[in-house]
Image (tube, rainbow, N blue to C red):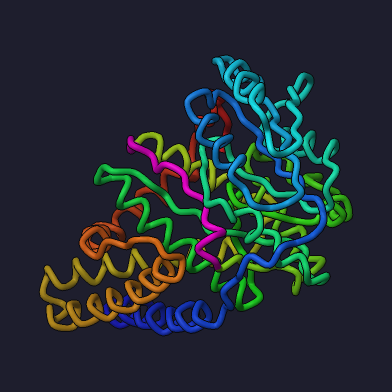
Amino acid sequence: MVLIAAGIVVSYLLLLLFPIVTWQQIPLVFSKKYGEKVSVIVPFRNEETNLRRLVKALKAQTHSSFEVLFVNDHSNDDSLKVLKELTKEDMPFSFSIISLKETQGKKAGIAAGIAQACGEIIVTTDADCWFDKNWLSAMTSGFNNTETQIITGPVVLEGADFFQKLQRIEFGAVLASSAALIGLGKPTMANGANLAYRKSVFTEVEGFLGIEQTPSGDDELLLMKIAKKYPEGVVFAKSPEAVVHTLAHTHWADFVQQRKRWASKWKVGMRWTTIVSALYVYVVQLAFVGLLLMTIYGELSFKWLAGLWLIKLALEHFLIWNYFHDLKQPCSFSHFLLLQTFYPFYVLYVGFASNFGRFQWKERSFKI
């Protein structure tokens, strides 16, 4: 058992070299303007406290030609009222406010926005996000290459408390790895808070048809549909200006609900690359816990366990540090170190809990 567990861990350490090297090879994106009109779609539900910050960030954009389509998904707070008040002011871009009636959910909101969009390039973000003034330029400049079909961008979690800072590191590791996989031609993940694609390719792959089983999936599942048809058309926007910020969760329960929602996407289409990747990460963490228990019971030398852990620590920190460094974002080593101490236990718990029962999202309940 010791050799099996150690072999799994060593294989993981060797595989870590691929995202480390690939991240270095992804070129930095600069804000070379995409000349055509761009359509930004913002689906929202009960976001009255966040819309002011979002609209402020949109008004600051330097991109010369864009529209914003705000899509109200049956909000039952003052979101619609707040948005209408905000848009009474002088707006440097054209905009529309659409309210869903017969449909609901984020994918329905995006589809409704795309149906009315004037731009060939669709950019999606969330109402609880904010970004740099050159965000739109950085996220669309890649479309100057006619082969580019979809661009995923970096999302950085913010927050002052301890739990939020740990989420920042953990999510940074996920996005650094997913960006590297895009660089390797094996895309597995995208985030709808920072995503851009051609309207024509959305129509060509029939939008969200076939991935309606989960309320989420407007990002990752759409990415996979496009990547299947255009394997060379997926790009990661590696640029400090392309970063989108959003607050991390403040409560453990909300965090678990989010992970359950993400897990609901993995079963759609039974995509072997995503399933194998998720299972492999789970098995690696299980192997680390197994090695720890074997060390406690005297079956493995503490020096061997410490050596493997230190190598893992060094490689993972190198990847995460480079990710945040290249995006000009702070990265706390102390929070990274603390996350490492209980990360295997977190993965085992969330990986198990995320595959059973129901999850809550936007005050709605869904079955996994």
Which residue is at a point 64% across and 52% down the rendered structure image?
A: 62
Question: Where is the C terminus found, in terms of image quarters?
Answer: top right
Q: Is residue 22 left or right of residue 289?
A: right
Residue positioned 73% across, 46% down in the render = 211
Q: Pick the residue in front: 3 or 177.
A: 177
Q: Is residue 151 left or right of residue 119?
A: left
Image check: 118 left or right of 191?
A: right
Q: Quadrant of residue 367?
A: top right
The residue positioned farthest toward the front in the image shown: 90
Q: In the rendered image of this protein, does residue 211 appear above or below residue 16?
A: above
Residue 138 % position (x, y): 63, 61
Q: Quadrant of residue 276?
A: bottom right
Q: Nearer the viewer, residue 105 or 345?
A: 105
Q: Is residue 307 something one can see in this rendering?
A: yes
Q: Determine whether 193 is above or below 311 in the image.
A: above
Reply above or below: 354 against 327. above
* Residue 248 lies in the magenta-colored region: yes
* Relative image position of residue 322 (x, y in whole percent): 40, 73
Task: Examine the rendered structure and indicate whether residue 336 appears above or below residue 269.
Answer: below
Residue 273 appears in the rendering: no
Of the pair 312 and 245, the residue shown nearer to us: 245
Q: Position of residue 187 (x, y in %)?
A: 63, 67
* Quadrant placement of the N terminus: bottom left
Residue at 52% across, 48% down: 131
Look at 81% across and 47% down and name the residue there: 207
Any magenta on residue 12? Answer: no
- Counting every numbered tag in the picture gives 0
Q: Which residues, given as a range, are shown in magenta?
A: 239-252
Apparent side of residue 113 relative to residue 293 in the rendered image (left or right):
right
